[in-house]
Image (tube, grey):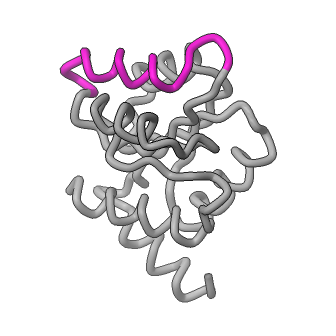
Amino acid sequence: MCYNEIVKSVIENNFNGMAKKVLIADDDEKFRTMIANALAQAGFTVIEAIDGEETLKKIRAEKPDIALVDIMMPIKLGFEVLEELQADPDFKNMPIFTLSHLSQSSDVEKVKRLGAREHLIKTELSIRDLVDKVQAASDSAH
């Protein structure tokens, strides 16, 4: 992203002076940090979690606008996180993207059934595409 694109994104992501909040839940620190940095540069406030239990605690406490949730995490799997959020009226409609190396159609169908907006395969994912998807979800949440 060039400087002008970053500034434009920061302005667009601010709503009443508050940047949109995105939670990134992934136990892979390097991957999580890379995504967090890209989203922060695009103007989002980033919250990080390293396991499924922490993910649920931070979602309930911080109330992010969008969540990126890894499927294979310690303590609670991403599937379990999705199930709990679907059962909670406060978070049932939150845009959630799942992230994983899992690409079997049964896994994709399961996360969609559990309320994920989209399932993203980590090995096929570009950072730019991810930022664009989060931006689009943010724009449609207005």
* Depicted 138 relative to depicted 107: above or below: below
Snapshot quadrant of residue 96: top left
- Give the percent coordinates (x, y) of residue 21: 44, 45
Q: Residue at x 36, y 57 (%)?
A: 17
Q: Quadrant of the N terminus?
A: bottom right
* Depicted 47 relative to depicted 16: above or below: above
Q: What count of labels does the image hold?
A: 0
- Give the percent coordinates (x, y) of residue 65: 35, 43
Q: Residue at x 62, y 66 (%)?
A: 127
| Residue 65 magenta-highlighted | no
Q: Is residue 10 left or right of residue 71?
A: left
Snapshot quadrant of residue 93: top left
- Give the percent coordinates (x, y) of residue 141: 23, 53
* Depicted 35 relative to depicted 99: above or below: below
Q: Is residue 126 left or right of residue 11?
A: right
Q: Is residue 141 left or right of residue 45?
A: left
Snapshot quadrant of residue 124: bottom right
- Give the percent coordinates (x, y) of residue 106: 42, 35
Q: Residue at x 67, y 57 (%)?
A: 123
Nearest the viewer among 5 and 109 is: 109
- Residues in magenta, as a range: 74-91
Q: Quadrant of the C terminus?
A: bottom left
Q: Is residue 15 left or right of residue 89?
A: right
Q: Residue at x 32, y 57 (%)?
A: 137
| Residue 87 magenta-highlighted | yes
* Depicted 19 relative to depicted 109: above or below: below
Q: Residue furthest front?
A: 105
Nearest the viewer among 85 and 71 is: 71
